[in-house]
Amino acid sequence: MTINYGKLFLTALFGMSLLISHSAHAATWSATASSCVPDNGSEGKYVFTDGKLTFSGSSTGTLAVRCNITNPFDDTDDRPVWNLLTVGYRDPDGNATDNHSTVRAKLLRVRKDSPADDQIAFFLSDNHGNSQNNSFDMHFAHGFDFRNYAYYLLLAVERDNTAVNRGENPAIWYVKLSTQ
C-alpha cells in the first residue's frame, strides 16, 4: 500500500481550515451594562456598581443605556451567526404587577443610509417570573450585515417605587450575543 503524503497533508490542511472557519463564525460579543452609554433621561438617577446598572437612592422611573455592537471580524466579509441573546439581570418583583419593576433588552439595527431602527430581539423580565439574580438565554433569528447596518443593544431598568421586595433594586449587568 502506497501512502501519498502530499494528498494526506492537503486533506488535513483543508479539514483544519474548515474547523477554523466554523469557529470564527461562532465568535461571541459581550458587554457589561456599566460599559454602555447612559441616555440623557437617566442622568442623576443611576449608579454603576461594578458591572451593574441600578437606581441610585430612592430614584424611580426608567434607566436606559445603549451598547454599541461591533463586528468581531472587523472589515472582512465574514459575519457572525449569532442566534442567542443572554441577559444577566435581577427583577425583584418577578412578573408581579404591583410595586412594579422590570428589566428590558432590545437588540436593534440601524440602516447606514437611514436613521430608522429595526428591532431584532426583545427580552422582558416580566415574562420570566424570576425575582433572584438570573441569567436568561433568548433565541432569535437574524442574518447580521455589518456592511449595511450598525447594531446596538438598548438596556433598560424600570421601577415605580422603592418598596419592591424589601427594597431590592432591579439591575442589569451583562449581555452577550453568541451562537447555539
Image (cartoon, helix red, strand yellow):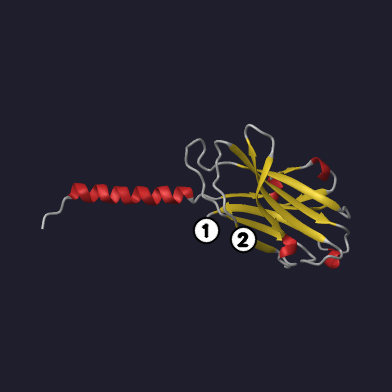
Q: Position of residue 17 (x, y in %)?
A: 36, 47
| Residue 170 appears anywhere in the view | no
157 or 174: nearer the viewer: 157
Q: Are marks 1 and 2 in contact (CB under 8 Å)?
A: yes
What's the residue at 56%, 39% (across, down)? 146
Residue assigned mark 2: 137
Residue type pointed to by label 2:
Asp
Callout 1: few (<14), some (14-19), or many (20+) C-alpha neighbours within 10 Å?
A: few
171 or 120: nearer the viewer: 120
* Count of numbered badges drawn on the protein: 2
Residue assigned mark 1: 180
Residue type pointed to by label 1:
Gln
Residue reaching furthest to the top: 113
Is residue 125 shown left or right of residue 85?
right
What's the residue at 50%, 44% (across, down)? 79
The Cα–Cα distance between marks 1 and 2, rounded to whole angstroms, is: 10 Å
Mark found first going from the N terminus, 1 or 2? 2
What's the residue at 10%, 58% (across, down)? 1
